[in-house]
Image (cartoon, rainbow, N blue to C red):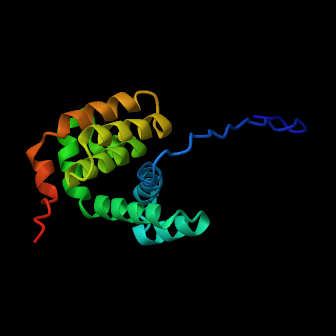
Amino acid sequence: MSSEGEEPEIIATEVLEHPQAITDRSAARRLALQILYEIDCTAHPPGVVMANRFQDDPPSRKIEHHVQQLVSGVTAYRDKLDTIIQRYATEFPLNQVAIVDRNILRLGSYEAATREIPINVVVAEAVELANMFGADGSTRFVNGVLAALIDDEALRQIIPPETGE
C-alpha cells in the first residue's frame, strides 16, 4: 500500500501461453472447459456463453460442433455426473472442489459416459487440461478421480449406447 504522495505499487502480471491444440477435439475440449467454467461461476445460460465466445473468437465449424455437444451434454447430465464424481472425490463436497477441476471432471466423465472416445484418451485429455488450467495437484486429483470412476456401472448408464435402430 502506498502513502500519500508515493507512486502506487505495480503488480506484474504474466500471460501464460498454452501450446496449440493438436486435434479439433482437443481444441473443442479447451473451449468447452472455458465455457463450462463461466457457466459454473456465473450461472449464465449456456447458449449465451457459447454465442459470446464464438462471436469473440469464431472456431471452425467442426470445433464449434464438438463444443456444443460437450457443453450441452455436460449441462444436461450435470447432476448425474456430479453424483458419480462425488463418490470418488470424497475429500470435499463437490461444490468445494476448485471450479476448474470440477468442470474437468464433469467433462471427462461425460466423455467417458458417451463411449465415443477410448477411456485412456479421455483420461489423458482431462489430465492435460488440469495441467494447463488447474493448480498444483490438479493433475493428480483429476487423474485419480477419473481413473477410479471410469468403471462405475452408473456412469455407463447415464447415456445409453445408441442401438443403431
Percent coordinates x, y for residue 54 in the rendering: 53, 67
Q: Quadrant of the N terminus?
A: top right
Q: Residue at x 18, y 39 (%)?
A: 149
Q: Residue at x 86, y 39 (%)?
A: 4
Residue 3 to residue 58: above or below: above
Is 4 on the left-hand or right-hand side of 130? right
Residue found at the far front of this picture:
164
The image position of residue 69, as x and y in percent, is: 34, 63
Residue 60 left/right relative to 84: right
Residue furthest toward the right?
Answer: 5
In depth, the one of 118 and 31 nearer the eye is 118
Q: Is residue 163 above or below residue 157?
A: below
- Location of residue 98 with respect to 72 vertically, above or below: above
- In the picture provided, is 163 more to the left or to the right than 26? left
Q: Nearer the viewer, residue 96 or 20?
A: 20
Q: Residue at x 82, y 38 (%)?
A: 8
Q: Judge by depth and name the residue closer to the eye, 74 or 12.
A: 74
Res 45 → quadrant? bottom left
Please state which of residues 78 and 9 is positioned toward the viewer in this rendering.
78
Q: Is residue 45 visible?
A: no
Q: Position of residue 92 (x, y in %)?
A: 27, 36
Q: Residue at x 10, y 72 (%)?
A: 165
x%, y% of residue 95? 32, 46
